[in-house]
Image (cartoon, rainbow, N blue to C red):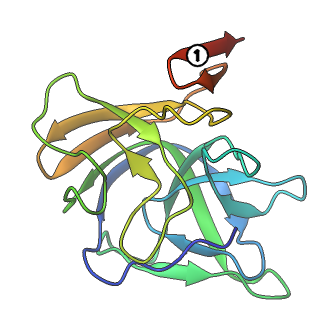
């Protein structure tokens, strides 16, 4: 999966809450502060993704203790010496509709797990997938045109079964 370091807008993580712990980043994996992440079977941090054939359910939000909230990315190395914190809740600022597709306004607009991040697009989206076999995971809500409030909790299993139907398990 790997992900990519953001090259344009850098999200700013505010007030990480519900800290789970600090874990090594899988070798070769690129994690941005604020990315939706999960632990693999070896308890190494990987980027979360909704995409069929590569679904990794988000378990938390990445944060770096040594970053002071200014954004940034880290890449896992052999020997697992690069680490990343994981929390359940955070506010993420300095966003735009390129970094978070369909981001606008505020109030009740939901935020969903998206595909693996690229250099310009995060793994958050404000549009529910209609692609068959994609994972649908609500991970927060829009607070303003530049901020989201993330709250990653177990949400059961919801998958898009066709362009107009969703199957929910759990």
Instruction: State the residue position of label 1.
Output: 166
- In x, y percent, where is residue 91? 29, 46
**Residue at the (30%, 39%) spot, across then down:** 149
Disc 1 is placed on an element classified as strand
- Horizontal side, residue 83 vs residue 143: left or right: right
Above or below: residue 145 compared with residue 117: above
**Residue at the (23%, 36%) spot, across then down:** 142
- In x, y percent, where is residue 62? 52, 59
Query: Which image quadrant is residue 59 in?
Result: top right
- Quarter in which the C terminus is drawn: top right
**Residue at the (47%, 55%) spot, across then down:** 123
**Residue at the (65%, 12%) spot, across then down:** 168
- In x, y percent, where is residue 23? 71, 63
- Horizontal side, residue 35 vs residue 92: left or right: right
- Horizontal side, residue 125 vs residue 24: left or right: left
Query: Which residue occupies the foreground of this view, 77 or 157?
Result: 157
- In x, y percent, where is residue 63? 48, 62
Above or below: residue 60 compared with residue 86: above
- Quarter in which the N terminus is drawn: bottom right
Query: Which residue occupies the foreground of this view, 147 or 14?
Result: 147
Mark 1 surroundings: few (<14), some (14-19) or many (≥20) residues within 10 A: some
Query: Which residue occupies the foreground of this view, 107 or 49?
Result: 49
- Horizontal side, residue 139 vs residue 1: left or right: left
Query: Which image quadrant is residue 97 in?
Result: bottom left
């Amino acid at each position: 999966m790997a992900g990519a370091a953001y090259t344009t807008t850098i999200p700013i993580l505010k007030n990480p809450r519900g800290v789970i712990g600090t874990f090594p980043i899988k070798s070769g994996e690129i994690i941005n502060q604020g990315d939706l992440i999960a632990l693999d079977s070896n308890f190494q941090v990987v980027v979360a993704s909704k995409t069929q054939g590569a679904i990794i359910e988000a378990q938390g939000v990445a944060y770096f203790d040594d970053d002071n909230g200014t954004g940034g990315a880290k890449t896992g190395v052999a020997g697992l010496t690069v680490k990343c914190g994981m929390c359940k809740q955070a506010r993420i600022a300095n966003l735009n509709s390129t970094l978070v597709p369909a981001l606008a306004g505020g109030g009740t607009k939901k935020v969903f797990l998206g595909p693996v991040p690229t250099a310009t697009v995060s793994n958050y989206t404000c549009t529910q997938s209609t692609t068959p076999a994609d994972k649908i995971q609500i991970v927060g809500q829009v607070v303003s045109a530049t901020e989201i409030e993330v709250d990653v909790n177990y949400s059961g299993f919801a998958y898009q079964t066709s362009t107009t139907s969703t199957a929910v398990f759990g």
